[in-house]
Amino acid sequence: MHGRDAGKKNAFQRHKEDASLREQQAHEETSRVYQEFVASFEAKEYATGTTGFVKAASSSRGTGNSTFQPMTFVKAGGAQQAEAAAPSKRPYEKMSTISTLDDHVPPAEISNTGAPKGKKLRQMDTFLEELKRQQENRSKGMDISGGSDDRPSASDAHTTNLFLSDLSASVTEQQLCHTFGVYGPIASVKIMRPRADDPTDRKRICGFVSFMRRDHAAAALEHLDGTVLEGKTIKAGWGKPVPLPPVPYFMMPPKPAQPERRRFPFTAQLVPQANGRERPEINVRFPKNNRTVRIIHRMIERIVKYGPKFEGMIMRREHGNPQFRFLFDHTCDDHVYYRWRLYSIFQGDTPQAWQTEPFQMYDDGVWWIPPRIPDIPFDEDGPTDLSWDSDDEAAERGRLGLGKGQLGKIGRERYEVLLRQVTLQRGTIAKAMAFAIERADAHDDVIKLTVKAVVAPGASVTAKIARLFLVSDILHNSGVHVTNAWRYREGFAHHLPDIFAHLHDIYRSISARLKAEQFRRYVMTVLGAWETWMLFPKHEIERLKGIFTADASQKHAST
């Protein structure tokens, strides 16, 4: 019946019985050692001729293999009775146990009273006091420094609990959480501090840190065992398994994600915007070397005609040539200009005019900032004879794939020649006007060239008046049934204030009074014709008159 009940004991009961058995054995062992130690000091007689202590294993009693039997505790006053009860033929048997504790105590250090001299006595007192202290701690359920056999080892694959010994008195559970939490979520944290009324006056502080996962606990044990926390070295080891909660007690807050630093192409740099954000931008700059500009433009013309294979051929043939460095060094400004110019031509821009607004070549790409169109003044010293005709212009448009809104290089050169040929004769003005109306699709280029010709610093006063008449004729014929011809009125309207401000300056600069008056009549005649044709509202005509005649009275008074 007893065996059947024993088989039904659970693990906790067996563990409790084993702990009680070990505690009882330790208590008996301590009592036996202390009893024999005290009894040895009570011995009165020693056999003559004895040269040393007789070990228990070498005793003539029995076979020498007798098992040690625990003895009852002997008080100091009962030493004589215990000695009398022992057989008289073995006077040194009580001392045999002491010899097992220190086999190297020479006979000369034994006093007449049978006790070791001062140093050995103090060592034994210390040893016995330690045994007593351990026994008291066991009886109170406290851990001892030597550890116990039932502490889990690293081979226990279930425990996630770490035992920490000899902690600093200033350490907190929050510090343990942040120190150990870097290795994984923590299930529980506990610091075992001594009570103020603890009679044992325990100085050391221990603690436990339990993880949610075994691998996190193993990593913490590997990296933190032996490190210093609050001035004391962490002594970590495996503790007994504890129940894990469904939710971690502590988790390290996630680190803010560092924005990944993008590697931008070419010479792109992050530029702050008005909304507080940043965007990568590439500022396109003109090459400083005019020869490089000509090479780039010729390359682009050939690529447009023959395709990307031409670029590959040039890169193979001119590798190492410093004049073609812009093809290989992607971080130089010349390469950026080459890439932008090639893209711009394929988008329909011309070498003389292009879109200046920022743009992206592809989605989520860098922003390209085109250069401003240089304000090149009208060249009065250019050719005055036409070397191209309309067939050459059409061939260029077909070769380069120019759209209707682009004048093209040959078209620009033809119109510039016509502007230089304009005089006060109506035939020259009519010829230039017809060219402009026929190319109304490229009205932006025509308007810009015409305005530059009017305000050109090197033009004569007569040339300026003749080109003003050209502007008037273009505006007068902007109502014809030609596609986009009506845009000339809107386009010139933005530039007229600048034109009349320039004419005002020319008028004030003329020193001859008759010549100045003639100049004034020409300008006022043009404004009167516009008012008659009703090209612009009356208030707009008056504004232009005011711009031209500003401070005119002061000028005449001074003359």
Image (cartoon, rainbow, N blue to C red):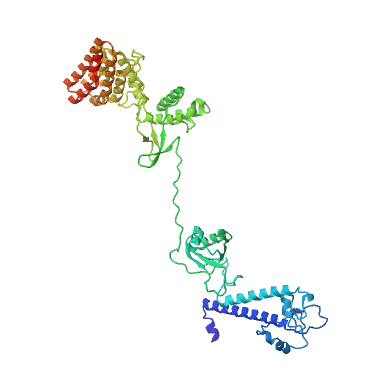
Please count the marks in the image.
0
* Direction from residue 43 to residue 242 in the image, left or right: left
Residue, far left: 532
**Residue 543 in the image, given as x and y percentages of width and height:** 21, 24
What is the quadrant of residue 97 in the picture?
bottom right
Q: In this view, does 463 lie above or below 37?
A: above
Q: Which residue occupies 51% across, 26% down?
A: 322
What is the quadrant of residue 541 in the picture?
top left
Residue 287 vs residue 136, the one in the foreground = 136
The quadrant of the picture occupied by the C terminus is: top left
Q: Which residue occupies 70% across, 87% down?
A: 82
Residue, far front: 558
* Direction from residue 232 to residue 549 in the image, left or right: left
Residue, far right: 49
Q: Which residue occupies 17% across, 21% down?
A: 531
**Residue 435 in the image, given as x and y percentages of width and height:** 27, 19
Residue 166 vs residue 378, the one in the foreground = 166
Residue 107 vs residue 310, the one in the foreground = 107
Residue 537 seen by the camera: no
**Residue 43 in the image, given as x and y percentages of width and height:** 74, 84
Residue 389 vs residue 208, the one in the foreground = 208
Q: Is residue 323 above or below residue 123?
A: above
* Direction from residue 467 to residue 199 in the image, left or right: right
Residue 288 seen by the camera: yes
